[in-house]
Image (spheres, rainbow, N blue to C red):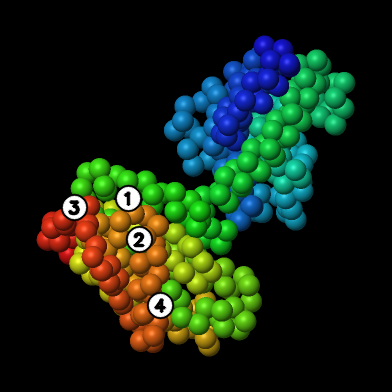
Amino acid sequence: MNLDDFFSTANRATSQDELIQLFLCEGVRKLRTDLAVYFKYVESKRSLIAESAIGLEANYIDGVGLDLQALEPGFYSDQLLEPWRLSSLQNFVNEGLCRKDALILPLLNGNLPQGVFVFATNDNQNLAGHENQDSYGTAAYEMQLAQKFANQRCHVLSLQEKLARTSIYDLDCEALSAGYFRQKLEQEVSRARRIKKPVSLVFISVDRFYDLTLEVPPETVRHFVKSIAEILHKLTRTNDLVGRIARDLFVVCLPHTSQSGAMIVAERMRRIFVTSKFKAILGSVGKVSVQVSVSEYPSLSDGAEELLRSAERALIEVKKQGADHVGVANTPPRFTPDFLVNNERNTPPVAR
């Protein structure tokens, strides 16, 4: 494989993991070595963690890491732009891999270090003088060119991943975005219609949310929103869907759950929010109250859109009662459901 072949293959990589494996294989082939390791850089711990290797068993690199903050006095992340200068990596090559030298190259996303490739050389190779590409020889020089392309591809993949997450997840938490939640709800209602099983919707509205955003910093609001999503994920099952469809409004889709089962889950959610310790996040404004509403297909609506609207109408009625209440949608007049629901058989395990 020449450089053009590597460029073409790397350009088709769909994830950073795939790109890393391609670059490891290219380095081993081009440098004619039998040993290569990729270290992932963990910014929060200022550490390099061995993640992938060629020529080593998986259990050999499992748990191997370099605490750069401890091993490199005065370490800062920009030093990983030229990782061959780090004595800890050279020591790893000499003592951990039992080799005299290595070609050490960074993986970058823009100017942000993502990790480090270590290609151990054979005893008859000489890669001294890392700053001077002429002393590398043709193979190592081509690896530098390949590394520059890999860095560019890493940046593109990072942007694509960020865009994909934005389209699926809310910007502030792990709840599904409004648009994506609606798509998934359409699918769940379609499946419920086909297998004749109910699907319920629970709306959770945070009381005084907009006032709260004026009282605490934006970063605190994001932390608060993330904690709400975490609570909802803990209270739901694996196949349930947790979304955020407005700044103050979360929604949970409960497949195979009737309105009676959903009411049990909704009441449990209300109690959890009342007793949750948000003061650690919000300080003096830590008391949080919610209003919760429930609707169901097929008993209270005839499709995904009407399921959302009926839950919204129920929420409006609940808010008239004040904070910390749960309400259920009304049955539409002259409404005929697509099928009848046995409430006893459609109560979610988490609610029993």
**Residue 276 visible at all:** no
Is 334 situated above or below 119?
below
**Residue 57 visible at all:** yes
Q: Earlier in the sequence, mark 4 or mark 3?
A: 4
Q: Nearer the viewer, mark 4 or mark 3?
A: 3
Query: Residue at horizontal 44%, vertical 59%?
Result: 243
Q: Amino acid at mark 4?
A: Ile
Determine whether label 4 and label 1 are within 8 Å by CB.
Answer: no
Q: Which mark is residue 307?
A: 2
Q: Earlier in the sequence, mark 4 or mark 1?
A: 1
Residue 90 relative to residue 259: left or right = right
Residue that badge 3 annotates: 339
Query: Residue at horizontal 70%, vertical 30%?
Result: 150
Residue 287 relative to residue 247: left or right = left
Q: Report x, y in % for residue 188.
A: 33, 49
The answer to which image quadrant residue 24 occupies is top right
Q: Report x, y in % for residue 88.
A: 68, 42
- The foreground one among 13 and 242 is 242
> How far is the residue under mark 2 from the one under mark 4?
14 Å
For numbered disc 1, what is the local secondary structure?
helix
Label 1 Cα crowd, 10 Å radius (few <14 / some 14-19 / many 20+): many
Determine whether label 2 and label 1 are within 8 Å by CB.
Answer: yes
> How far is the residue under mark 2 from the one under mark 1?
9 Å
For numbered disc 3, what is the local secondary structure?
loop
Q: Nearer the viewer, mark 1 or mark 3?
A: 3
Q: Earlier in the sequence, mark 3 or mark 2?
A: 2
Q: Earlier in the sequence, mark 2 or mark 1?
A: 1
| Quadrant where the N terminus is found in the figure | top right
> How far is the residue under mark 4 from the one under mark 1?
23 Å
> How far is the residue under mark 3 from the one under mark 2?
15 Å
Q: Report x, y in % for residue 258.
A: 22, 60
Residue that badge 4 annotates: 316
